[in-house]
Image (cartoon, rainbow, N blue to C red):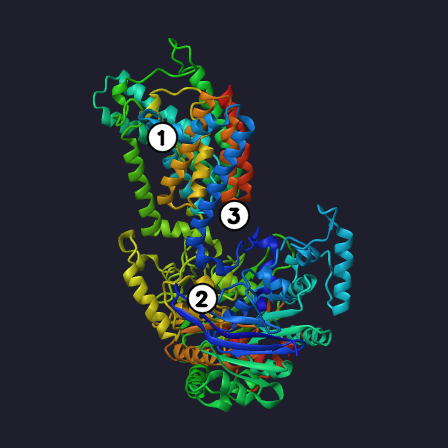
């Protein structure tokens, strides 16, 4: 076959990806994936138990704190569900990027920036004496999404025009954004009457309606679910989603089929950035009502994990986000009630991430390393 | 005698609705070369995958030396010495030859570090023993398909596998490479290895095998000793009852073009009619409708100073088959990229029906559109299909406008159209199944069905279209090409198979070092030798070359 030599003229074709799995694997994929996922989740819970046994003074108590307390009362349960909301939205953003084989590692910055922009817009509206809460919220979220889209699109354009790896550029852009937002929150936008490094607080009327008092859970969870379903429809039913997936699965074939691959190295990153920023905005309106320095630290990285565990399937994002929120809630409760440190949960989450991605996604090694690095950074950020 | 027996193996793929094996049996004697032959989709590959532990049979058993065994994974089959050499070699292009060979079974220092010295010496020893000419430290990406296959074979031997399964090893090889592969296999047999080779080419079987198992529709039709069957009989056995005209069909693979008289070919009537009309049209120069015009195109790469294609001009008219051939590395690959819209020429023009050619990212119209281009790529696994999608999705990817009216998928229509296109090409599989689990030949047929189903595109770029096809399918393809030509498609046939070029082409263009070395009318006087000389750049004083070139302008 005459092409054989040509296939390997590496300098013309750029990097070649070897097939990660033999083709016959696709057949059993669904069932096998589900089984592996459940196994991996089980194994990671086991690991948490072992970790607790090793590091806790009161093993049984900490077990209870970790696994049972998040469900123990309405307050804990609501807060746990509430944390799952931004994870779903941001996870959808990550899934969009991953489905098109673009790796958006800038989630952290995009969430954070989205939160700040939403806060600022809402504060401005408040200053102007805006009455209609719904419109203010919509406008704020829209502008936040736009900002995130721009940040994401920036990496996309760099990739398209200058062939800059989007993993690097989105990550660096995000670090930059984090510092800028940190500065703004601690400087020009700081609430002078507060001891926190935070913006002014929005009136509680601007927030989403709470549905499970006294917890923070708000109607935003329904919007998040709606968004997830919408994402599923877009990815599975529309030509946009189809082209996006084809470009992600096999660039060469996409080109062959006449799909404009250039578009699909930009648009998914825009969408991804917008959804991340939206997640930040949602956090503001459902829980915080102000941007506190470093408050969203880790959400962007968790979103990556959530999306990878869900294998970029929007519907699977829901359980995946809930599981991550559960781990988060469990660790917080264990941390408060016993001598277990917050690093434990980071280790646990890392284990989940490792176990699941290592068994099913051999192609994302790059993301692995970045994820761990990012989580460590985020943990540092929280401690400060 | 020591044997491996597969007894009444059945395997059903629910997603694609294919009963790949239906009570197939196989009896393999150690120390022999055993060929499994059959048409595309006869279930050969599935049976071999089951033997190699890559698939699990629904029913049936595997007996090794009369003891039943169950191969849960390929590793278990490996413990019994069974190893598979894949049709599309599984190699890591960035690794060196030795790294690829020892991959996963690296000899280690204190169980941790790879012991590179031992690796090197073992690989060198293996190569010498088997007479392979491989440089252990060469990066594999720079080597050809023949070397990749040798690496796969060495890998299996390195893992102490004594029973080697080769899945259509010859389909990716050039003719000289096939010979050297056969030498290697005979050598291995002499050293006590057992070789199980899948193929659908009777000639290869008879040249090599000691025993032959014939499969048809997932069943074993019979087992024969090599001496007891001849080529005719074997072809008859492979194709079963739906054999059109036995003797001619068998001769296809062997003597296509060598006799250079189309009267002897099985697709003869259609080809012949078409050919005559095309020739009249050609010489009388009436109605010159150039579907494709290639006007002095050159392609230079940034990395090498010498142009990879230089000053290539030709045109293809309606109802003309233009064969383009070259030795590997002489610009045929690039020609495919240019015609397929993957590469923009650095200078020169391409026109399609007088309009600028749809080079990427201007989009190729799907082949069933009136302004469509059918393109069968030579690299079917990477460019031709997306193996993570279903068959249906591989079809609708080409025409999102039609299958996503108003932006939303219309799966019902997609499925029906895909299914009818598959049926039209005689591929009987369910369109909803994933394409990745089909065998190489069936994937090729699927691509052909997608690109060449009714209605035909005005321009067809066919690159090695018959790669991996069995005799019946090749016949069908040739007949289809003839039909398309009669309907007025302009067809560019890029092929490394000279027989194919000689059989089908009205005109033959030979590339040498990126230039047109010859532009010949296929008037029946062209021989393989003549083409070979042109391909090697030995030039030709033949006036027809010059003439042909002038006429194409």
The residue that mark 1 highlights is A71
Q: Which quadrant of the structure image shows residue B388? A: bottom left
The residue that mark 3 highlights is A359
First in sequence: mark 1 or mark 3? 1
Left-right relation of B215 to A268: right
Q: Secondary structure at mark 1?
A: helix
Where is residue A157 drawn, in percent x and y? 46, 40
Q: CA distance from mark 2 to mark 1?
A: 59 Å
Where is residue A329 drawn, in percent x and y? 41, 28
Where is residue A312 drawn, in percent x and y? 41, 45
Q: Which chain does the residue under circle 3 lie in? A: A
**In the displayed structure, would residue A124 be above or below residue B518?**
above
Residue B257 visible from this viewpoint? no
Direction left: furthest residue: A131
Is disc 3 in contact with disc 2, using a CB cutoff of under 8 Å? Answer: no
Q: Secondary structure at mark 2?
A: strand
- Quadrant where the N terminus of chain B is found in the figure: bottom right
The residue that mark 2 highlights is B375
- Give the mark toward the camera: 3 or 2: 3
Mark 2 crowdedness (10 Å alpha carbons): few <14, some 14-19, many ≥20: many
Q: Which chain does the residue under circle 1 lie in? A: A
Q: Secondary structure at mark 3?
A: helix
Q: Which quadrant of the structure image shows residue B346? A: bottom right
Left-right relation of B545 to B180: left
**In the displayed structure, would residue B259 be above or below residue A258?**
below
Which of A167 and B25 lies nearest the eye of the viewer? Answer: B25
Q: CA distance from mark 1 to mark 3?
A: 30 Å
Mark 1 crowdedness (10 Å alpha carbons): few <14, some 14-19, many ≥20: some
**In the displayed structure, would residue B553 be above or below residue A354?**
below
């Amino acid at each position: 076959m005459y092409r054989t030599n040509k296939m390997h003229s590496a300098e013309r074709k750029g990097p070649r990806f070897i097939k990660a799995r033999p083709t016959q694997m696709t057949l059993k994929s669904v069932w096998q994936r589900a089984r592996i996922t459940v196994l991996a989740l089980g194994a990671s819970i086991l690991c948490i138990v072992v970790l607790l046994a090793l590091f806790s003074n009161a093993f049984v108590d900490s077990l209870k704190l970790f696994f049972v307390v998040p469900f123990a009362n309405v307050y804990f349960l609501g807060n746990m569900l509430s944390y799952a909301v931004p994870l779903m939205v941001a996870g959808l953003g990550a899934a969009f990027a991953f489905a098109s084989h673009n790796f958006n590692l800038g989630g952290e910055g995009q969430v954070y920036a989205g939160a700040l922009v939403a806060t600022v817009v809402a504060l401005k509206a408040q200053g102007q004496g805006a009455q209609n809460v719904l419109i203010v919220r919509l406008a704020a979220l829209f502008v936040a999404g736009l900002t995130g889209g721009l940040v994401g699109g920036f990496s996309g354009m760099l990739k398209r025009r200058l062939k800059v790896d989007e993993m690097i550029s989105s990550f660096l852009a995000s670090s930059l954004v984090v510092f800028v937002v940190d500065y703004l929150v601690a400087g020009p936008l700081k609430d002078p009457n507060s001891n926190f490094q935070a913006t002014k607080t929005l009136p509680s009327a601007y927030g989403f309606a709470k549905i499970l008092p006294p917890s923070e859970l708000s109607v935003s969870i329904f919007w998040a679910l709606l968004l997830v379903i919408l994402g599923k429809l877009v990815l599975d039913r529309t030509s946009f989603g189809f082209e996006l997936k084809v470009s992600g699965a096999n660039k060469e074939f996409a080109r062959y089929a006449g799909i404009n691959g250039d578009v699909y190295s930009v648009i998914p990153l825009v969408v991804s950035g917008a959804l991340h920023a939206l997640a930040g905005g949602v956090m503001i309106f459902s829980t915080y009502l102000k941007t506190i320095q470093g408050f969203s630290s880790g959400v962007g990285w968790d979103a990556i994990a959530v999306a990878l565990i869900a294998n970029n399937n929007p519907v699977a994002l829901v359980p995946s986000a809930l599981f991550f929120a559960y781990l988060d809630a469990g660790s917080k409760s264990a941390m408060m009630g016993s001598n277990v440190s917050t690093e434990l949960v980071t280790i646990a989450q890392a284990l989940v991430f490792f176990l699941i991605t290592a068994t099913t996604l051999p192609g994302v090694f790059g993301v692995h390393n970045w994820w761990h690095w990012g989580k460590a950074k985020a943990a540092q950020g929280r401690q400060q | 005698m020591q044997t491996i027996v597969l007894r009444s193996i059945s395997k059903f793929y629910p997603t694609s609705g294919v009963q790949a094996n239906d009570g197939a049996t196989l009896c393999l004697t150690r120390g022999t070369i055993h060929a499994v032959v059959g048409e595309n989709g006869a279930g050969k590959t599935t049976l071999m995958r089951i033997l190699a532990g890559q698939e699990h049979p629904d029913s049936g058993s595997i007996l090794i030396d009369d003891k039943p065994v169950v191969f849960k994974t390929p590793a278990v089959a490996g413990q019994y010495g069974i190893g598979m050499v894949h049709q599309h070699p599984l190699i890591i292009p960035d690794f060196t030859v030795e790294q690829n060979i020892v991959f996963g079974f690296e000899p280690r220092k204190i169980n941790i570090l790879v012991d590179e010295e031992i690796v090197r010496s073992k690989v060198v020893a293996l190569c010498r023993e088997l007479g392979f000419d491989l440089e252990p430290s060469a990066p594999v990406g720079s080597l050809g398909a023949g070397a990749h296959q040798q690496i796969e074979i060495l890998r299996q031997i390195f893992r102490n596998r004594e029973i080697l399964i080769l899945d259509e090893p010859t389909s990716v090889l050039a003719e000289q490479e096939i010979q050297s592969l056969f030498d290697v296999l005979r050598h291995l047999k002499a050293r006590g290895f057992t070789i199980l080779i899948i193929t659908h080419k009777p000639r290869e079987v008879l040249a090599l095998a000691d025993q032959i198992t014939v499969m048809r529709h997932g069943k074993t039709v019979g087992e024969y000793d090599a001496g007891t069957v001849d080529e005719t009989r074997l072809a008859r056995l492979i194709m079963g009852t739906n054999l059109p005209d036995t003797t001619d069909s068998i001769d296809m693979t062997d003597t296509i073009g060598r006799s250079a008289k189309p009267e002897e070919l099985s697709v003869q009537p259609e080809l012949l009619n078409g050919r005559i009309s095309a020739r009249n049209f050609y010489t009388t120069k009436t109605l010159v409708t150039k579907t494709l015009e290639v006007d002095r195109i050159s392609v230079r790469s940034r990395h090498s100073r010498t142009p990879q294609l230089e000053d290539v001009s030709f045109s293809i008219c309606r109802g003309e088959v233009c064969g383009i051939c070259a030795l590997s590395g002489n610009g045929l690959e690039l020609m495919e990229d240019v015609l397929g819209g993957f590469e923009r020429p650095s200078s020169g023009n391409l026109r399609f029906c007088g309009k600028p050619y749809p080079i990427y990212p201007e989009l190729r119209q799907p082949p069933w559109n009136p302004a469509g281009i059918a393109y069968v790529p030579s690299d079917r696994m990477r460019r031709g299909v997306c193996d993570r999608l279903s068959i249906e999705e591989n079809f609708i990817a080409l025409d999102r406008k039609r299958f996503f009216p108003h932006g939303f998928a219309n799966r019902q229509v997609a499925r029906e159209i895909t299914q009818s296109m598959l049926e039209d090409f005689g591929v009987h599989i369910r369109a909803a199944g994933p394409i990745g689990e089909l065998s190489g030949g069936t994937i090729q047929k699927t691509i052909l069905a997608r690109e060449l189903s009714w209605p035909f595109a005005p321009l067809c770029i066919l690159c090695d279209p018959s790669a991996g096809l069995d005799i019946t399918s090749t016949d069908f393809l040739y007949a289809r090409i003839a039909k398309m030509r009669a309907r007025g498609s302009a067809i560019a046939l890029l092929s490394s198979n000279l027989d194919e070029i000689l059989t089908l082409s009205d005109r033959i263009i030979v590339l040498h070092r990126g230039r047109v070395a010859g532009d010949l009318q296929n008037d029946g006087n062209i021989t393989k030798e003549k083409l070979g000389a042109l391909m090697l750049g030995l030039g030709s004083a033949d006036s027809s070359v010059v003439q042909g070139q002038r006429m194409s302008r």
